[in-house]
Amino acid sequence: MTQEQYSKYSFLLDRTARKVKQYAQQQFKSGDFDVTVDQWLVLKNLSENDVLSQTELANLVFKDHPTLTRIIDLLCKKGYVERVPHPQDRRSFQLHLTETGVSKVTSLRPEILQIREKAWENLSTHDFEEFKRILNTIYQNLNGESLDQ
Amino acid sequence: MTQEQYSKYSFLLDRTARKVKQYAQQQFKSGDFDVTVDQWLVLKNLSENDVLSQTELANLVFKDHPTLTRIIDLLCKKGYVERVPHPQDRRSFQLHLTETGVSKVTSLRPEILQIREKAWENLSTHDFEEFKRILNTIYQNLNGESLDQ
DNA sequence: TTTATATATTTGTCACACTAACTATTGGTA
DNA sequence: TACCAATAGTTAGTGTGACAAATATATAAA
């Protein structure tokens, strides 16, 4: 294998990641989910952790702080999330889902699992494990010293 | 495997694709390459095809037309690419590299191959083939009827 | 206590992705 | 000829991503 062919992974990886996001986003839209794919990721993580600071949430979803600030702004505007001042630390907020946010997550979760399955047609459980292993290895190879996860 | 675990691929895929792009972009920056990762992809494809229209190029790099318009705007501004009016079809342009563009590609190509290799530490040639197969399968699963490539 | 440093979040800038709407042009057809 | 659908490309709006810098507060050190 020449070095040239070797470097195509980056193109395929980028192309596939975009397609996965695009496909999900189209389904989200045609189902009137009222959230984007990234907003869903944030909602889902908030639903699995009663209360989080923005920093904790950023580490969970692997987004940087400015990006997260903006996503949360939008989710607050839509009424799914609330920022509550931290009682001890006035720099920080405690994030939690509103009533509306909880029921949004409950109603969307099964539909989204359905959407996600489509990608795995013609692929096996073993493929899935290999895929995860390779993705994680690449991630760690490029992640310098910070070995989070 | 539960449906829930099964849906994690989208998170890992997105996370890894972003890391790959971010790593490359950092290297591009510290090497003063004067282009972004996506701009490089466009330059590279132009160097491999003497003359292309924007639509042909968009199909090669799998970017949509508005995105490509902007990338080409930037590359023209930097002096690496020229838009030449198509002699027969006044709607369309013929894109080609300038002298500067050609030498930019020549000088960057080996450095970028170097950067791309880093991701494959601890992974085998077989992993690479499996990875490509799975990525392409996912892509096609989500790509509706249009079976390009 | 004062100073220094670290942490939590926001703001600004540039680049890219996707959608929708728009202009200009082409080519076929009534 | 006049009309109409398709094509090439651009523009605008919104969301996201990376990075740098700013603000506010907290904590540790001198």
Image (cartoon, coloured by chain):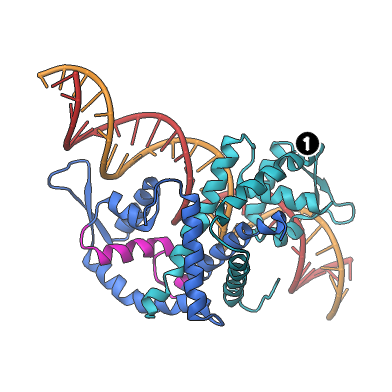
Chain colours: A blue, B cyan, C orange, D red
Residue A44 shown in magenta: yes
Viewer-side residue, B12 vs D19? B12
Is any part of residue A84 visible from this angle?
yes
**Location of residue B106 in the rendering, given as x and y in whole percent from the top left corner:** 76, 42
- Residue type, numbered disc 1: Thr
- Queried whether the magenta region covers residue A105, the answer comes back as no
Q: Quadrant of residue A3?
A: bottom right
In x, y percent, where is residue D17?
47, 51
Give the overall secondary structure of the magenta segment.
helix
Which chain's residue wears label 1?
B
Magenta residues (range): A28-51
Q: Nearer the viewer, residue A72 or A89?
A: A89
Residue A103: name its quadrant. bottom left
Q: Is residue B22 left or right of residue C5?
A: right
Q: In this rendering, would A46 be left or right of B93?
A: left
Residue A82 position within the rendered picture, expressed as x and y whole percent measured from the top left: 24, 56
Q: Quadrant of the N terminus of chain B?
A: bottom left
* A114 vs A14: above or below: below
Looking at the rendered image, the quarter that the C terminus of chain B falls into is: bottom right
The image position of residue A127, as x and y in percent, is: 52, 76
Determine whether A116 is above or below B68 in the image: below
Look at mark 1 in the image and give the residue it sits on.
B100
Q: Is residue B15 left or right of residue B135?
A: left
